[in-house]
């Protein structure tokens, strides 16, 4: 299962069909249908009713989409949390402070959470 598959399924739930969902997420209807077909194959459940002109969610698809909505909300919450924790910290987890001195520059000073808040001088 990939998040994009859940996002496409959620888009179908939100927009009422594969074509409208595809327009909303800026991919082809075939990409949406194919992603959902992989979910159907992996979990042996019919998520889309393809008997009409526009593929729409089946009853099982509506239930699945409701659960997907919860997962996607949790992923968004986790992303927001990660962004808030990383303010002022570089991607490698270090906070860097560069301070000029009177006779040249000090070496960069790094702080990491793993070090319990201690400063260390990196050279």
Image (cartoon, rainbow, N blue to C red):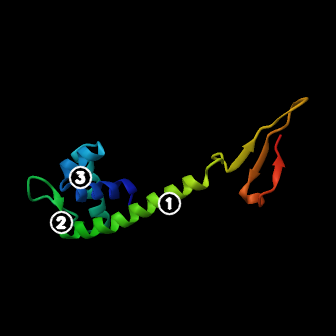
Q: Which residue is drawn at 24% across and 59% down?
A: 13
Earlier residue among tags 1 and 2 = 2
Where residue 19 appears, as percent x and y from the top left, is 18, 48
In the figure, residue 36 lies in which quadrant? bottom left
In this rendering, position of residue 82 left or right of residue 100: left
Where residue 18 appears, as percent x and y from the top left, is 20, 52
Furthest-left residue in this view: 52
Furthest-front residue in this view: 102
Marks 1/3: CA–CA distance:
28 Å
- The residue labelled by disc 2 is 58
Earlier residue among tags 2 and 3 = 3
Earlier residue among tags 1 and 3 = 3
Q: Which residue is drawn at 20% across and 48% down?
A: 20
Front in this rendered view, residue 19 or 38: 19
Q: SS for tag 3?
A: helix
Q: SS for tag 1?
A: helix
């Amino acid at each position: 299962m990939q998040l994009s598959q859940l996002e496409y399924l959620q888009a179908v739930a939100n927009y009422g069909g594969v074509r409208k969902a595809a327009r909303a997420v800026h991919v082809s209807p075939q990409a949406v249908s194919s992603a959902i077909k992989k979910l159907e194959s992996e979990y042996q459940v019919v998520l889309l009713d393809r008997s009409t002109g526009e593929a729409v969610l089946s009853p099982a698809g509506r239930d699945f989409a409701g659960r997907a909505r919860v997962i996607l909300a949790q992923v968004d919450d986790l992303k927001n949390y990660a962004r808030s924790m990383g303010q002022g910290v570089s991607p490698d987890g270090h906070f860097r402070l560069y301070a000029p001195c009177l006779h040249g520059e000090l070496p960069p000073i790094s702080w990491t959470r793993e070090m319990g808040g201690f400063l260390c001088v990196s050279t």
